[in-house]
Amino acid sequence: MIKFDEVTKRYPGGYEALKNVSFEIAQGELAFVTGHSGAGKSTLLKLAASIERPTSGTVLVNGQNVGKMRSSGLPYVRRNFGMVFQDHKLLFDRNVFENVALPLAITGVTGREAGKRIRAALDKVGLLEREKAMPIALSGGEQQRLAIARAIVSRPAVLMADEPTGNLDEQYANDILSIFRSFNEVGVTVIIATHDARSIAQEGTQVIRLEQGNML
């Protein structure tokens, strides 16, 4: 499903966020990307989702070399991915329902079908009764749940999250991780970038460890 082969990402100024990283994540797998701040976790997610391109090496998604694809083809690859960003990227001038509706509107899903999908996503993360609330009225954990609902409403094959438990207490963190695992149990590939060792205490998951851009 996702394969990195000797991937390096170098930014302007010469900073190398990733250095010759190689791994594979199979369809339906649960994988954690770990390392301290600045290790290259966020860069790895962006490359996998074809938000950025590698400087060298090969990134394959479903057998396609996304680093060599034309820009016009990348949006179709990205539709396979649901992203939960570290800063949530919520729209604070729109309510919960409208935030989750945005990805569907971009892909042309509207009306009754959109409403059905939005409410199903909100129900999955426990926010169905708060669909008319504004994001500012939600707790940190609820905002994280809203970001997850928005990421999964388009039914992506791959769900990615960047430090989803970083600012949450232990109970909320466990609840959020349970949500991700529930998606994995029904066949969704889940990739979580985290520095929280509690998150990866589960047998049978792949752990990709990074340190200053190098894979350990």
Image: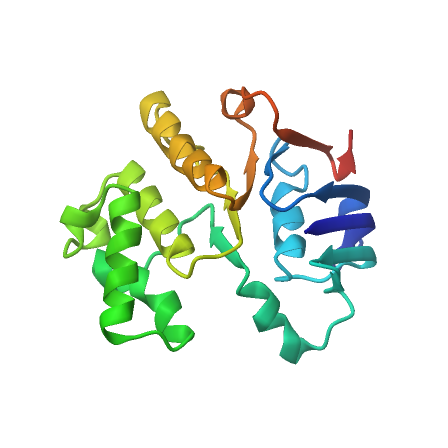
Residue 58's image quarter?
A: bottom right
- Residue 89 makes an appearance in the image: no
- Residue 66 makes an appearance in the image: yes
Between residue 12 and residue 64, name the one nearer to us: 64
**Quarter of the C terminus within the rendering:** top right
The residue sitting at 67% across, 47% down in the picture is: 44
The image shows a total of numbered marks equal to: 0
Coloured how? rainbow
Between residue 216 and residue 3, name the one nearer to us: 3
Between residue 42 and residue 175, name the one nearer to us: 175
Q: Is residue 58 left or right of residue 202?
A: right
Q: Position of residue 63 (x, y in %)?
A: 75, 60
Residue 60's image quarter?
A: bottom right
Q: Is residue 2 left or right of residue 20?
A: left
Q: Position of residue 206 (x, y in %)?
A: 65, 31
The residue sitting at 44% across, 38% down in the picture is: 180
Between residue 1 and residue 147, name the one nearer to us: 1
Q: Is residue 166 left or right of residue 150?
A: right
The residue sitting at 51% across, 44% down in the picture is: 187
Q: Is residue 45 above or below residue 70?
A: above
The residue sitting at 57% across, 72% down in the picture is: 75
Q: Position of residue 30 (x, y in %)?
A: 57, 36
Q: Is residue 55 above or below residue 161?
A: below
Q: Where is residue 36 in the image (x, y as percent from the top left)?
A: 62, 30
